[in-house]
Amino acid sequence: MSLRRSIYKSPAQLRAMVEPGLITAAALDAVRDLIAPGVTTAELDAAASAVITGRGAKSNFQMVRGYRHTICASVNEQVVHGIPGDRALQPGDILSIDAGAEYKGWNGDSAFTVVLPDPARPGIVAEREQLSRVTEGSLWAGIAALARARHIGEVGAAIEDHIEAHAPDGGYGILREYVGHGIGRKMHESPSVFNYRVSDPGPEVRPGLVLAIEPMVVIGDQATFVEDDGWTVSTLDGTAGSHWEHSVAVHDDGIWVLTAPDGGAAGLAPFGVTPREIA
């Protein structure tokens, strides 16, 4: 099988990926609107599920063997893959939500991070808000790099450069064991999308490429472990983590962020990139 057939989509296939991206975005919006102290992560999961099923789609997370939930909800030292349950959110928590939808055989995947206000701990809140802001900025830096890149490796270099330029003294840790990926008929496809520089430039960036770009960044050391539930990835040193993600398509006229209703216009504007709708 040729590389083009394995990772590059046709224009018609790219068009088919627009709706699952928008459904994923709507599910995350519903979760975002519900986040508040006292709300459980299971309630957030139910809100995302209602949107996805209400629009005739399926949770692609539930298609992963052994996983029964619509979202991943990762709190504080949990960076990714946190399981929703009866945990109630607390003031000052940093929460990352990851979700995806499958619609007519095509997938969307996206994530965001939010910090709950806590007037009693302004320093903790400010530290965590900065982490989230830098992580989100690195996501948009990587997406902007994709718009101009010749090879996928340039995306990871841009992400790392942004993090290093905007992290506080001492820097942040970028998770090495967990990276972005291609997306299409399956939620996780080739190629891998690293969030840091690698020696291999990677596959060529050309029309038909669709990537889920997802930096995962922590305040302390990047070392992590998987908790006893077999899913939740937490920092060894107990420091907070942040996770941001979008699914992005490269097409003949440019790029389009499939999981952003505006195609990524607001996030890309500071980088001088204008997304173009898929024709």
Image (tube, grey):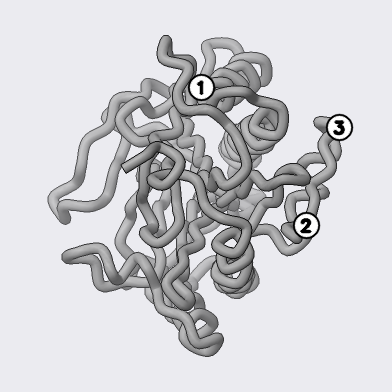
Q: Residue at 36%, 51% (x, y): give it.
A: 188
Does dot 1 land on a helix, a strand or a loop? helix
Which quarter of the figure has residue 105? Answer: bottom left
Q: Quadrant of residue 175?
A: top left
Q: Which residue is pictured at 75% across the width and 42% down the height?
A: 254
Q: Residue at x 28, y 69 (%)?
A: 63
Query: Mark 1 is on which residue type?
Result: Gly
**Residue 272 - label:** 3
Relative vertical location of residue 52 with respect to residue 201 in this rendering, above or below: below
Q: Earlier in the sequence, mark 1 or mark 2?
A: 1
Give x and y (percent) for residue 158: 62, 22
Mark 2 crowd level (few <14, some 14–19, many ≥20, 10 Å Cα)? some
Of the residues tagged 3 and 1, which is closer to the observer? 1
What's the residue type where badge 2 is placed? Glu
Up-down relation of residue 26 to residue 165 (above or below): below
Is label 3 in contact with label 1 (beta carbons under 8 Å)?
Answer: no
Residue 47 in the figure: left or right of residue 30: left
Indicate left or right for 89 with 228 as reference. Answer: right
Quarter of the image where the C terminus is located: bottom right
Q: Residue furthest front?
A: 1
Where does residue 65 sit, x and y in percent of width and height?
18, 64
Q: Residues within 10 Å of mark 3 (few under 14, many from 20)?
A: few
* Of residues 10 and 62, the one drawn nearer to the viewer in this rendering: 10
Q: Residue at x 64, y 32 (%)?
A: 146
Question: Can you identify the residue that label 2 sits on?
Answer: 277
Q: Position of residue 55 (x, y in %)?
A: 55, 86
Q: Secondary structure at mark 2?
A: loop
What is the quadrant of the N terminus in the image? Answer: top left
**Label at residue 153:** 1
